[in-house]
Amino acid sequence: MPRPFLPQGAPADLAAGPQQLSHDERLAIADAVLSWLRAEHGDDLVAVALFGSTASKSDGPFSDVQMWSVVEDRAGPRPDLEWIWGPGKLTVERMTVTQAITRAAWVDGRWPVAQARFVRARPLWEASRQQGFVQRLHAAAADLPEAARREAAAECVLEMYTALGKLRTCRAGPKGDVVRIAFDFGEPLMRLVALRHRYVFGSSRRMLAEAHQLDGPPGYQPLLERLAAGPYRPPDELVGAVDDCWAGVITWAQDEGLDLSACLTPIHQPAGVEGPPEPPADRDELGLGPPPLPAAAAKRRRRRGMFGRR
């Protein structure tokens, strides 16, 4: 039987830029990719899911299609796929079971955005031996231990602090790109507020709209309104709005139970490590047996099992 082929684009597709598609047309593309993944991986395929705006049915006429797939560890890691497939762009994140468990359990300052691919995933297919696997990843990603939340909040505040310094420099001298820097402050602010509410945004595109629905520190809503409105004249007003918001952030965080003391001590970042660490040693609760890596690899920062805190 001939193997299905992935949908592909042509130079003219790239030159034309994104074209309009309906939600059903995106689902048809996802189905074609699912057929390819099942043919490509056979019995090693564990699960395939949609994430992003197509999964939540909030996709617009020019939205991308975003998917992830999981294979058994014995199949080995595969590179992610991203390409122009005609009228739009398709992304397929490919993981082994161990990688999926690790990434679902990972917590850092981008948790409210990054974990949407698990928390808001829409299952397309699961192997009969692993029914409910997507839901188990969802539960692991939605779990937010207090110690991990505290460090993640501290990372957000340090990002805000850096942007605030740049904005005050703009006020003191040449103005620079005040709008861009204000967004550099506002984006981690929204993630900080989401951490307070243990909330995962549907997508980065919807972050600003969804952030409006969350209660934040004094000056939070006015700043979001300024960021959403544009254009910004004069720049000093935007800098002032950021300053006003910052004035209430620390007290608000303390009142809301977000301990920011980690900002005042070095936050350890392992040298040469980007993103989630190596997989946790304990995978028994999924019935997956021992990890394929040495136990020493399980001693990295912010490690926790899929169904419990460590």
Image (tube, rainbow, N blue to C red):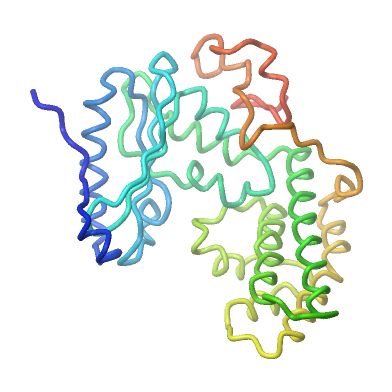
Q: Eyeballing the image, is 243 above or below 282?
A: below
Position of 106 compared to 11: left or right? right
Q: Eyeballing the image, is 65 above or below 162?
A: above
Pinpoint residue 290: horizontal percent, then vertical percent. Answer: 55, 9
Q: Nearer the viewer, residue 152 or 178?
A: 178
Position of 220 compared to 100: left or right? right
Pinpoint residue 17: horizontal percent, then vertical percent. Answer: 29, 65
Q: Nearer the viewer, residue 189 or 283?
A: 189
Residue found 32% across the figure and 47% down from its top? 83
Residue found 63% across the figure and 24% down from its top? 305
Position of the C terminus, as image quadrant, is top right
Residue found 8% across the figure and 23% down from its top? 1
Position of 156 compared to 68: left or right? right
Q: Eyeballing the image, is 43 above or below 33?
A: above
* Quadrant assignment, res 210: bottom right
Pinpoint residue 250: horizontal percent, then vertical percent. Answer: 86, 61
